[in-house]
Amino acid sequence: KAGVTQTPRYLIKTRGQQVTLSCSPISGHRSVSWYQQTPGQGLQFLFEYFSETQRNKGNFPGRFSGRQFSNSRSEMNVSTLELGDSALYLCASSSNPGTDVEQFFGPGTRLTVL
Amino acid sequence: TQLLEQSPQFLSIQEGENLTVYCNSSSVFSSLQWYRQEPGEGPVLLVTVVTGGEVKKLKRLTFQFGDARKDSSLHITAAQPGDTGLYLCAGALTGANNLFFGTGTRLTVIP
């Protein structure tokens, strides 16, 4: 079974631009979560989607947004990029978003903001 | 402030040595997971523990969940270079669908 895929793997943007990252979960998984990973803050939860609805949101500004499509694929968008947004953005999918939170991660998208 | 604190932050040991990584919190978790992440990759799940006091073994790795479900440890016996990586603990709070990750322990095993 194919794993979680994320595109693109690497991205370079400049301050003020916006960016869209894509995530395709494992087939059959309906829950998709997004995390930001930086050397200073570690892995921080951004938001989680299930059946096209955002169910949970971390403590990030409104510049960070996401959505999920009917096929469970998800995108996240960051507008008005800042230097501090440079990070590895990880997507994780889960089959049962209830009490079972075992998540399977993709390889991430490395975003560099210049 | 991180919900889960890991120690040590960095660990460099010789092949064949034993080591223990700790994951501590003041919060109670419904489950706790351990992941290993290698450069350029996402974290890979190693184990999930759900019962206070639970001990799970995965070959040379032993995972323990504290009785009060606030802390966990990972013990590696006879470390090998292939164990090198970033070890992350992650806890799930009751009713939440996201994980809270620890600060991470970067392990280097020298041949």
Image: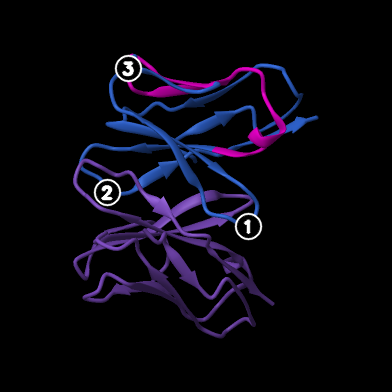
Q: Could you tell me which residue is drawn at 40 percent across and 43 percent down? A: B100
Magenta stretch?
A: B61-87
- Tell me which residue sits at (30%, 18%) in the image: B52
Q: Position of residue A7 (x, y in %)?
A: 50, 74
* Residue receiving disc 1: B40
The numbered mark at residue B97 is: 2
* Residue B68 numbered tag: 3
Mark 2 vs mark 1: same chain? Answer: yes
Separation (CA) of disc 2 from disc 1: 26 Å
Q: Which chain is purple?
A: A
Element type at marker 1? Answer: loop
Chain assigned blue:
B
| Rendering coords of residue B99 (x, y %) | 37, 45
Instruction: Tell me where residue B66 appears, x and y as whole percent.
Output: 38, 17
Q: Classify A53 as above or below B80.
A: below
Q: Secondary structure at mark 2?
A: loop
Residue B22: quarter of image: top right
The chain holding disc 2 is B
Q: Secondary structure at mark 3?
A: loop
The type of residue carrying mark 2 is Asn
Instruction: State the separation of the CA atoms marked 3 and 2.
Output: 21 Å
**Mark 3 belongs to chain:** B
Identify the residue at image location x=43%, y=28%. Answer: B25
Exactly how many numbered labels are in the figure?
3
Q: Which picture quadrant has residue B53?
A: top left
Check the image and report above or below for A4 versus A70.
above
